[in-house]
Amino acid sequence: MLKLAGIKNRQARINQVSVGIVRPGFPYLRVAGGEKILVYLPGLSDAFASPGEYPHAYAGIMPRLRETHTILFLGRSGQRPPGMGLADMVDDIDTAINSVLIQEKPDNHVVDLAGSAIGGIAALAVAAHHPEQIARISINSAAHRLSDEGKSIVSHWLELATQQSWSALSDAMAGVAFTGLRRSLTKALSRILLPIGSGIPESPERLMQALQAMLAADLGTHLGKIQVPTQIIGGAMDPLFPNDILEEAAALIPYSDLLMFGSAAHGLAIEKRKQFEAEMTAFFQEELED
């Protein structure tokens, strides 16, 4: 009886996850929950496994946040031109968010917005240029621009991606994303999986587009336009978006809150998952004052 109950519970969780496409050709993965809508813009992981590829892995994500929010992980369209810059990406995301609102809540005009890395940069740009549909924002491992060291690192990643040096790229990314034992284990695992095709981006073009957009991004003059509560979560050991860059972003956004994880790097959403999810959930579930 216990075994059968476990199977039924697992099936119920899986049934809460679905995939689809919203205009202008953005794939999404929907995790059913409460009445509010959270649109989450992923980082570089979107180029390796776009939303919809592994829906079962998302069945248990952010359980407390799902008490109030239905979550849509929004990928990037594979139909867009390779040289497309951040401004065009932001216009596409704005269109996609409007499509989500029509699909989910025709009588509701706002969503909560979150993003990681390039997704976090895009979230800031959407809030600055298309503020009418955003209630609040949470970004992690992201800011308005890369640090100088970050530009050097991402330029190297772009060079490796252009050369299709996937093993070297995986090593380089793991070195920035994680700390300690997790960094070593990730590097070792990638050497095992790469020969059988895992860890190779399903869309090298989308990866290079994201890397180029990260390098070109500088939203400093636009952050003052963001007039909604904004949460910034960073890792103190992240060379791409270190503490001084995050403090600069927080100072430029009128209603912002900066939270640093002292022993985390760029991949804090994975490395510190429980703490990260707890902080983001608390932020989005906090009642807004009139």
Image: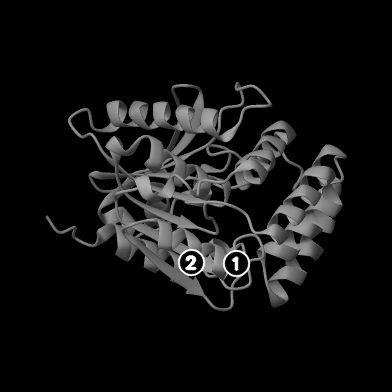
Residue that appears at 68% across and 73% down? 179
Q: Residue at x 62, y 47 (%)?
A: 45
Q: Nearer the viewer, residue 46 or 262?
A: 262
- Whether residue 166 sits left or right of residue 34 in the image: it is right
Task: Locate residue 241: give its quadrant.
Answer: bottom right
Of 98 and 188, nearer the camera is 98
Q: Which residue is mark 2?
A: 247
Mark 2 Cα shell of 10 Å, populated few (<14), some (14-19), many (≥20): some
Nearer the camera: disc 2 or disc 1:
2
Horizontal side of 74 relative to 177 (left or right) equals left
User: Image quadrant of residue 254?
Assistant: bottom left
Q: Position of residue 203 (x, y in %)?
A: 70, 33
For badge 2, the amino acid type reads Glu
Measured as percent of width and height from the top left, residue 89 is found at 53, 31
Residue at which label 1 appears? 242
Q: Is residue 109 left or right of residue 174?
A: left
Placement of the C terminus among the 4 image quadrants: bottom left
Please name the residue shown 63% across and 72% down the image: 237
Name the element at disc 2.
Answer: helix
CB atoms of marks 2 and 1 within 8 Å: no
